[in-house]
């Protein structure tokens, strides 16, 4: 609890008695610089000039007083640096050379600028007391908060000073310190990458780097798993468990895409949106390409680029089913020539939708009561490139289907009966019979036909149990990427119903 009523009030000379804080997280300048540099920074980047204009028009408002702290025998302003910088510049416009003409003119319009040279401040008893106040004002809800990067920098500065995450969490019980520690550590990861393009590093280290866009990614557990980043639940500390080379490649793409406007908080607004899902696919493809490049398989990088490079602009890869026609293929010259000039492009077909190379499992939520194996299977299904590994994906889909139905029955306390000629094991066929009856008895009639399709293939071979079995057992049968997509379209709704808590 902060009790400011006990803090000492002092009347000080803004020019001689108090100093601006070089450790202020607003600043992007090294500690120990001249105070004039701090003033200039606050005028150039923190709109201190608007405070001078306000003081000139309505006078110095004293409902809030600056907070100072004694440090190394000097009174340092720990809260109210912009206001004090404005007051210092009014007394000496040369402190802000880029704005001195405007400041001088405003100062001359004041009836008695000497009257605001001496102001009242409050002295915080300790650095911890000052930190708690600053945190309450700028990372809580009592005042317009600092930007996300600034908020993170506040707590990072205390970590750098030797405090532990646990100490900070205990010191600020009303603030989600863990969130700010995570934000700071994630930023640190991206800023410490040795980018091949130095301008990307400069951009990532800018104080106004749009960390909110980055947060749209790192707040998604699937993104963290994909790029090999772990966040400790208790403290918010971040660790990199993937290789530095892999992270460098993904960081290069993300920082470049943020800088170039390819992604922002709007395009990544929802993890279930098409653009978000496509971007996650792009990252998976990029990392697959990185692993291919690192492997000793002997295959050339160009061989893989046809199937594992993905453009952030959404171009679909050409494959056996594409017949050489990409989504942006132009009309043939003979077709264009046969049309009149007024008809050119009128009937031009729309670009084909991009075929996904990964199954979208975002709509599946595995209940905590289900075995760990089901959680792991869903995780693997979301990571497999079906364009490159259709047979492996279809085989895993069969496993997913059977084991998830068994887990569902187990949670319900029901037994899946075996056929009279089967001994020892419950097979996929038994699971599907049980599931169809389960849907009938619970009135979930919309799912009966999809189960019947899977059971008997009466609506087609692809996506049926017969295809799943044949791909698994028959040495002459293989799956295509489109087989996987169609099978997923058949069973996804059924799996959502089975996994529903």
Image: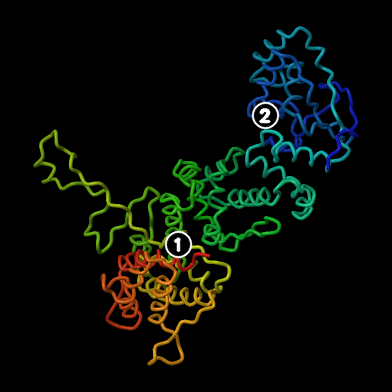
35 in relation to 464, above or below: above
Asked if marks 1 and 2 touch (Cβ < 8 Å), the reply is: no
Q: Position of residue 29 (x, y in %)?
A: 69, 36
Mark 1 secondary-structure assignment: loop
Residue 44, label in figure: none
Q: Which residue is mark 2?
A: 41
Evaluate whether residue 175 shows in this view: yes
Q: Which residue is mark 1?
A: 361
Q: Position of residue 167 (x, y in %)?
A: 79, 53
Residue under the point 15% across and 48% down:
332
Q: Which quarter of the figure has residue 137?
A: top right
- Name the foreground residue: 287 vs 464: 464
Mark 2 secondary-structure assignment: helix
Evaluate whether residue 297 shows in this view: no
How is the rendered protein coloured?
rainbow
> Which residue lies most toward the left here?
338
- Name the foreground residue: 342 vs 432: 432
Q: Which quarter of the figure has residue 101?
A: top right
Residue under the point 49% across and 41% down:
259
Q: Position of residue 82 (x, y in %)?
A: 72, 27
225 in relation to 29, above or below: below
Q: Residues within 10 Å of mark 2 (few under 14, many from 20)?
A: many
Instruction: Judge from the rendering whether residue 326 lies leftward or rightward of residue 74; answer left or right.
Output: left
Distance Cα–Cα, label 1 vs label 2: 48 Å
């Amino acid at each position: 609890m902060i009790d400011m009523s006990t803090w000492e009030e002092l009347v000080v000379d803004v020019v001689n008695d108090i100093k601006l804080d070089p450790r202020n997280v607003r600043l992007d300048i090294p500690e120990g610089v001249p105070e004039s540099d701090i003033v200039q920074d606050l005028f150039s980047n923190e709109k201190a000039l608007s405070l001078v204009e306000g003081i000139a028009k309505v006078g110095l408002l004293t409902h809030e007083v600056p907070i100072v702290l004694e440090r190394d025998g000097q009174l340092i302003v720990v809260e109210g640096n912009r206001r004090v910088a404005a007051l210092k510049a009014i007394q000496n416009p040369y402190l802000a050379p880029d704005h001195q003409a405007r400041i001088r003119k405003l100062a001359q319009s004041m009836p008695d600028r000497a009257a605001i040279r001496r102001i009242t401040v409050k002295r915080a008893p300790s650095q911890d007391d000052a930190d708690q106040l600053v945190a309450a004002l700028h990372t809580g809800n009592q005042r317009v908060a600092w930007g996300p990067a600034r908020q993170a920098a506040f707590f990072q500065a205390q970590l750098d000073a030797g405090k532990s995450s646990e100490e900070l969490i205990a010191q600020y019980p009303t603030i989600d310190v863990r969130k700010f520690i995570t934000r700071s550590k994630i930023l640190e990861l991206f800023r410490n990458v040795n980018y091949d393009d130095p301008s990307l590093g400069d951009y990532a280290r800018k104080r106004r780097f749009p960390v909110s866009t980055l947060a749209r990614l790192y707040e998604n557990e699937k993104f963290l798993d994909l790029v090999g980043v772990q966040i400790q639940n208790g403290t918010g500390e971040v660790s990199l468990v993937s290789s530095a080379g892999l992270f460098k490649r993904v960081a290069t793409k993300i920082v470049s895409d943020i800088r170039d406007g390819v992604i922002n908080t709007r395009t990544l607004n929802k993890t279930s949106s098409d653009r978000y899902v496509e971007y996650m696919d792009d990252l998976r493809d990029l990392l697959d390409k990185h692993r291919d490049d690192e492997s000793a398989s002997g295959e050339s990088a160009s061989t893989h680029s046809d199937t594992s490079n993905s453009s952030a602009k959404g171009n679909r890869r050409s494959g056996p089913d594409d017949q050489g026609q990409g989504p942006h293929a132009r009309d043939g010259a003979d077709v264009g020539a046969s049309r009149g000039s007024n008809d050119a492009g009128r009937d031009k077909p729309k670009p084909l939708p991009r075929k996904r190379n990964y199954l979208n499992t975002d709509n599946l939520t595995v209940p905590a009561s289900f075995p760990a194996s089901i959680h792991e299977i869903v995780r693997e299904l979301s990571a497999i490139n079906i364009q490159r590994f259709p047979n492996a994906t279809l085989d895993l889909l069969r496993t997913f289907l059977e084991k998830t139905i068994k887990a569902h029955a187990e949670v319900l306390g029901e037994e899946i009966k075996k056929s009279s000629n089967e001994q020892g094991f419950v097979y996929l066929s038994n699971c599907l019979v049980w599931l169809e009856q389960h849907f009938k008895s619970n009135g979930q009639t919309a799912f009966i036909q999809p189960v019947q399709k899977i059971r008997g293939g009466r609506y087609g071979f692809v996506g049926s149990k017969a295809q799943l079995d044949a791909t698994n057992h028959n040495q002459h049968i293989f799956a295509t990427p489109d087989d996987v997509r169609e099978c997923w379209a058949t069973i996804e709704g059924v799996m959502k119903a089975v996994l529903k808590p």
